[in-house]
Amino acid sequence: MASTHIRDEERRFRIDPADPRSSVSDIVQSLVQAIAESGLAPGEKLPPERRLSDMLVVGRSLLREALKSLHVLGLIEIRQGDGTYLASRPTNLLPQVIGWGVLLQTTEAQQLIEARLFIESSLVRLAAARSTAEDRAAMWSQITVMERAVDPAAFADADSKFHFLIAKAARNAVLFSVLENTKSLLHAWMARVIDDVDDRSELIRQHTAIAAALEAHDGEAAARAMEGHISAVTHLLQNTLPAGPSLQLE
């Protein structure tokens, strides 16, 4: 019988049926839990869409939205015409997503973006007063990397490093730790944005404005530049997501 010929990766993949009222967020949670417990190695293939849909007892359209969210988070790779695979590169995001509760197009996402706005605004104000010449030189160095980056992943990496250099320069371990806890997700979101943007000059201009304000030790200007940057990136992110509730900053 066909059931006896389930591939090895499917045999290891156990997933509980979803509640009939399940949202995309709930389905993502179930998928992440199943991936974590399946023992699938990076690069291994997940069961096909139809099989996952049957296992979860959910429609294919809802399942696809959940898979898109996992793709945005960098947990899976969707290969057109081939199937869905666990991301080739090991990620430390997988165990965190379960605790965070999905995060894309959810109340949690909105709250995380708001938290990032307040945290980074505070960090950049502190960095304006506490950063050293060496700190600021390292930030300018990352802007240079962004300007020269051909690969979107290299740009996203430099972008992430720029923000955490500011956090480090603020010399506040508590605020730094809060931001550090969201590092993987923020990097995944930035990579998604960069991959969808043809002209990165505006993003470079935004980072330059932040660095210039820090160089002038102007905390208020630095905070305004940071807030403008986060707001702009949030709108860019929204354009890459499946249709649904908007992620907005007040």
Image: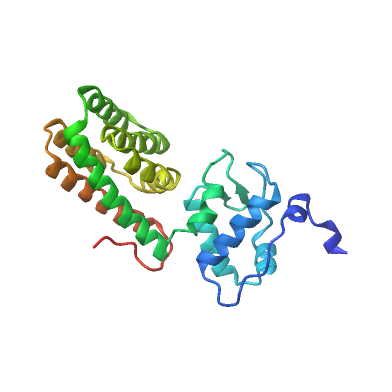
Q: Give coordinates of residue 232: x percent, y percent.
A: 25, 52
Q: Nearer the viewer, residue 209 or 80?
A: 209
Which quarter of the figure is the C terminus placed in?
bottom left
Residue at the location (31% across, 33% down)?
A: 168
Which quarter of the figure is the N terminus placed in?
bottom right
Kindly give the residue lying farthest to the right in the view shown: 1
Q: Give coordinates of residue 123: x percent, y percent.
A: 25, 42
Q: Nearer the viewer, residue 146 or 92?
A: 92
Asked if residue 205 can be seen in this view, the reply is: no
Q: Give coordinates of residue 187: x percent, y percent.
A: 41, 43
Asked if residue 163 can be seen in this view, the reply is: yes
Q: Nearer the viewer, residue 156 or 49?
A: 156
111 with respect to 90 (left or right): left
Residue at the location (56% across, 60% down)?
A: 29
Residue at the location (44% across, 59% down)?
A: 104
Residue at the location (67% across, 69% down)?
A: 17
